[in-house]
Amino acid sequence: MTANFTGILSGMTNDQLQQASTNAQQAYIALATGSKGESFSYSQGEGSRSVTYTRANLAQLSALIRQLQQQLGLICRARRPVGFYFR
C-alpha cells in the first residue's frame, strides 16, 4: 500500500519509507561517530537515488531523516511562524 502523501517522497510505501529512514539514521550515526563517507540509496517508484554524505553533510542528512519521519507520521510538521497583524 502506498502512503497517501504529496511531495518528493510520494509514491513510496510505508515499508520503503521506514527502510529509507533506518538506512539514513544508520548513515548519520556512522558519520557522526567517525570521519568516513557513507553512501545511502533508496528506490522511489521505478527509479532509485543514491547519495554519498561526509561529516560536512550531517545537517543535510538530518533534514532527510526528519523529512522521512514526517512522511511516516512519526514527528509532526513544524508549525508556521506566528504572525502579528497590526491595523
Image (cartoon, rainbow, N blue to C red):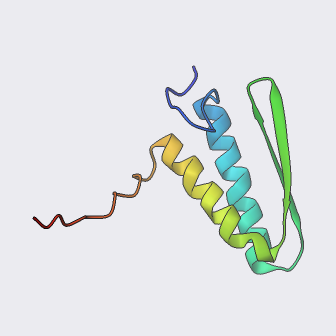
Looking at the picture, how far across and down is residue 5, in whole percent?
50, 31
At a point 83% along the width and 35% down the height, the residue shown is 48
11 left or right, relative to 56 = left
Residue 37, image quadrant: bottom right
Residue 62, image quadrant: bottom right
41 left or right, relative to 69 = right
62 left or right, relative to 57 = left
Looking at the picture, how far across and down is residue 54, in whole percent?
84, 71
At a point 45% along the width and 43% down the height, the residue shown is 73
At a point 73% along the width and 60% down the height, the residue shown is 26
At a point 69% along the width and 42% down the height, the residue shown is 19
In the rendered image, the quadrant that contains the N terminus is: top right
In the rendered image, the quadrant that contains the C terminus is: bottom left
- Residue 76 vertical placement versus 86 (above, below): above
Looking at the picture, how far across and down is residue 32, in whole percent?
74, 77
List the single residue furthest toward the top. Answer: 1
List the single residue furthest toward the left. Answer: 87
Q: Nearer the viewer, residue 45 or 80?
A: 80
Looking at the picture, how far across and down is residue 79, in whole percent?
34, 57
Q: How many marks?
A: 0
Q: Nearer the viewer, residue 31 or 8?
A: 8
Q: Nearer the viewer, residue 68 or 7?
A: 7
